[in-house]
Amino acid sequence: MQRTLLALLCITLGGIPVFCQVPGYLGKRLSIQAEFHSMPALNGPTANNRGLQTHYGDKGGGFALNWNAGLRAGYVTSRSNQVLASLDYFKTGMIQDAYSPSSSFGSPEYDSHALFYNITGITGGIGTRGFATEKGALAPMGRYSGFSLNATFLRGDILDKRTSYSDPFSESHAPLGIDAKALLFSLGFETGVNFVVKDRLLLNVGAKFNLPLSPRVYRYAFGEEYDWYPYNPDTDYTFAEGNTENFKTLATTRAALHNLVMLYIGVGLLP
Amino acid sequence: MNMYKIAGRLICSLFLLASCSKYETQYEGPYSENSGGPEEPAYYDMVFALDNQLYMASADLKKVKKMPVSVPVARVAINFSHDRIAYLPAFGGDIVIIDTSGAQIATVPNSGDATDFDFHANNQTLYFLDDNQIRFHGPNVTVAHTDLDNAQPYFGVPYYHSVTVLPNGAVAFGFSVSGGPSSYTGFRIAYVTQQPGQQDRNLPVSSQFPGKIRTTLDGSKLFVIAGSQCGTFNSQGSSALTQLAGAVSQGALSPDGTQFVYWLPSELTLNILGTQFTAGIGFGQVNDIDW
């Protein structure tokens, strides 16, 4: 009887450290991960003017990849959950038609400019991942799904310009007045799988869908907001204001398409 | 393991090939409005009325701005220093003097019937032709005649179409006389004092309508438009017309007399004679122009 009680006591006491261990990777809750996201650029153009459907000018086009790269800091909150803060960077291409008042005063009364941009996006986000952990598991490992809220700050740099002057003898044009900055919010949904290698290294692969939250994107997608046209009687925009509004619409739409669906791989450390 | 290596290399190669090459410039290259420093200020030298709207243009016609004038404009003039503009409303009203921003400086009393007007070389005095009288607004100036009936020798019924006052006070004007023993259509210049090379004389043209005459800043040349004829006279000595261009509808000489801007309705452009400077105006109607 005493032996039986002693055995039960040992089993009970021996089990206590197991169930009292904090969730995480062998006690490590924090993880740092680098992720690379990519997808073929169907609608293009990319930063180097490639893309299967759209490119700028006579040169360019062809197969290319959209991509973004970033860092994730993860913190394990329970056996099956992790919260994340992320910072991502991408660069892509964009085409815009802009207008400026012409030195000519007949018809048309404006010069038009076909612009090729490189759009740089820096995305900050917060999110969470939920893991389908096996019963008794202490670390969020294996298959997961998650969501995140992201804000992408966009900046455009004009790499090329082709001006069509209303007056063919013109050699200069008025400033375009484009404030080439825009902001895009998006809601990310992802699913993937995560592995721990040799207790120190995290590997993951997954897919992410980013739902744009900017109304501009939907107005443009559904044809309610066209490329700004200088004589739109419904607006009181100056040329510069119209160019800037158009930039914001096109840049957020381009970024939204760029990030819409991505496949990714990640490598992380458990510090 | 080899499969993983091969797949990894393939992915890296594909990424480098597809996304890491640089953009190849095709047209004008990078553009930044900050890289060129502040934009050079525009200098507007000439003024014109297009479809009764008032505009200013630079001497090379590359910059044009519409002036904030709320009434339709029939005729325009700009002073030699290009800082004052006078315009005559198209549907009645006195001549208005504005600066180059469009701010009103003055309204010229009793000038609503003016048939021609311009600024004197002092850049401040506006003179205008009212029937046979030259009237003034601004500082006093010397002038050979204020009543043009005294500046021409013909009997009959005169009609005065245009006038310009030279810096030395000479008066040159376009007129036609009919109904008397002799008739004349053309221009004439009358001086304050008769000196060698400065005798009152006719400046003949073949047209029936000597509609415009303007002096250069120094008074050495007289620019005229008379129907299908357009050219210059020397203000001293000669009475021969030097043809500038044929069949222009509107035109103006630069203050120094070296450049000539003109409008040909058939070309839909304003042009600087002898240069490639031009500006398209489409099917608009140029009512008047001054430089």
Image (tube, coloured by chain):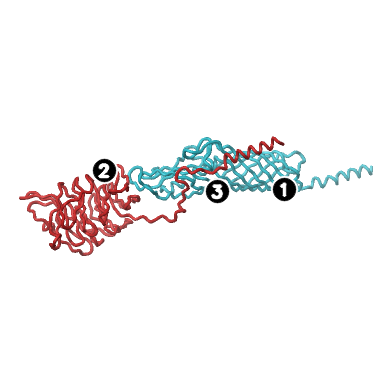
Q: CA–CA distance between discs 3 and 1? A: 29 Å
Label 3 Cα crowd, 10 Å radius (few <14 / some 14-19 / many 20+): some
For badge 2, the amino acid type reads Pro
Eye-nearest disc, 2 or 1: 2
Task: Provide the secondary structure element on which disc 2 rests.
Answer: helix
Does any portion of residue B113 appear in the rendered image?
no
B85 vs A11, nearest the viewer: B85
Q: Nearer the viewer, mark 3 or mark 2?
A: 2
Chain of the residue on which disc 1 is drawn:
A
Residue A270 got which mark? Answer: 1
**Discs 2 and 1 carry the same chain letter:** no
From the top left corner, tell me how far across and down residue A19 is, in percent. 80, 45
Q: Which residue is mark 3?
A: A153
Task: Check if mark 3's residue and mark 2's residue have beta carbons within 8 Å.
Answer: no
Relative to residue B39, is residue B263 drawn left or right?
A: left
Find chain A in the image and tell me its colour.
Answer: cyan
Colour of chain B in the image: red
According to the picture, the residue beneath numbered tag 2 turns out to be: B265
Type of the residue with mark 1: Leu
Which one is in front, A191 or A64?
A: A64
